[in-house]
Image: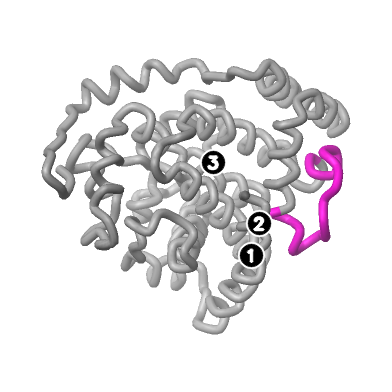
């Protein structure tokens, strides 16, 4: 149940039925479809992927914008699709393509642009944390950050009245995290939906599993460190103002995640400062 004048409920059967529509990725652009297919090859080269993407100027621009927002603080300005593919890696490029498809599907819904900006900032912060901690899965952290809220797109698309009412609340902040309210309304939250979508579209477990346990980290026995990286990145991005103002909510699990990762106050401040230095560029590139 959500706040407001109208009450809305949906049972798990309804949610499950609607999820079946997402068995096939709703790809409108043949270039996106071909690019995803090319990325599925074990022998594909960076140049082949870049050539596929360059067939669609709008998609190429999206890749360049996202690549610059995620990497230019580490590498300098990216000017070509080939350079973007090399620097980001196949996993992140595939994540960008998947995000682009699903985000485009929900264009016009309240909050979708804020969700995209939030996801990009979470991706950037996750990369910063993974690099600082010396984790071997820096690319996976970056990609998981980009995809961690993909389940919200399902709710935007399938239950627009839910989020329309949420955004009509106005300037008042929510008294609890959005995932708790989703569970109360739908029986599942966006993390569960996101995990299902990522599995459906062939994303590996190192990306889908941490998304599932994002709001229940002790239950994740396979990738606990990556889950905690996402928690910290998600909460830091929210605290920085990247996200919907209605969901400006920093959770208690942040402190536990910082402790599990061995990040102290000075680490937190340094990560925040580095992420903040990138925020203006991210806003410009998202225009």
Rendered location of residue 238, percent (x, y): 44, 62
Q: Which residue is found at the position 25% from the left and 59% from the top?
A: 174
Q: Residues within 10 Å of mark 3 (few under 14, many from 20)?
A: many
Rendered location of residue 214, percent (x, y): 40, 50
Please name the residue that numbered disc 3 is placed on.
Answer: 207
**Nearest to the observer: residue 49 or residue 157:** 157
Label ID, residue 284: 2
* Badge 3 element: helix
170 sits left or right of 5 in the view: right
Rendered location of residue 70, percent (x, y): 68, 54
User: Is residue 134 visible from the viewing direction of this image?
Assistant: no
Please name the residue that numbered disc 1 is placed on.
Answer: 280
Disc 3 versus disc 1: nearer the observer: 1
Q: Which residue is found at the position 60% from the left and 70% from the top?
A: 276
Compare marks 3 and 1 and give the one earlier in the sequence.
3
**Nearest to the observer: residue 46 or residue 166:** 166
* Badge 1 element: helix
* Magenta region, residue range: 69-85
Instruction: Tell me the CA gap for discs 2 and 3.
Output: 28 Å
Compare marks 2 and 3 and give the one earlier in the sequence.
3
């Amino acid at each position: 149940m959500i706040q407001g004048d109208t009450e809305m409920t949906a049972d798990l059967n309804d949610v499950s039925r609607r999820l079946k529509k997402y068995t096939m990725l709703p790809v409108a652009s043949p270039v996106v479809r071909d690019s995803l297919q090319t990325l599925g090859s074990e022998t594909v080269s960076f140049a082949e992927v870049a050539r596929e993407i360059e067939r669609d100027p709008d998609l190429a621009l999206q890749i360049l914008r996202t690549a610059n927002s995620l990497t230019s603080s580490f590498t300098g300005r990216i000017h070509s699709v080939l350079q973007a593919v090399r620097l980001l890696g196949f996993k992140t490029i595939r994540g960008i393509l998947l995000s682009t498809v699903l985000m485009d599907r929900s264009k016009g819904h309240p909050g979708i642009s804020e969700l995209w900006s939030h996801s990009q900032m979470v991706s950037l912060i996750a990369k910063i944390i993974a690099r600082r901690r010396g984790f071997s899965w820096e690319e996976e952290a970056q990609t998981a950050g980009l995809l961690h809220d993909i389940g919200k797109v399902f709710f935007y698309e399938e239950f627009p009245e839910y989020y329309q009412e949420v955004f009509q609340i106005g300037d008042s902040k929510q008294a609890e995290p959005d995932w708790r309210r989703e569970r109360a309304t739908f029986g599942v939250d966006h993390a569960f939906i996101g995990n299902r979508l990522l599995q459906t579209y062939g994303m590996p477990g190192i990306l889908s599993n941490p998304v599932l346990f994002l709001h229940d980290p002790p239950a994740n026995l396979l990738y606990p460190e990556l889950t905690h990286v996402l928690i910290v990145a998600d909460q830091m991005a929210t605290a920085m103002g990247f996200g919907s103002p209605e969901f400006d909510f920093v959770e208690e699990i942040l402190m536990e995640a910082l402790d599990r990762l061995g990040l102290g106050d000075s680490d937190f401040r340094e990560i925040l400062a580095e992420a903040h230095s990138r925020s203006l560029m991210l806003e410009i590139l998202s225009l």
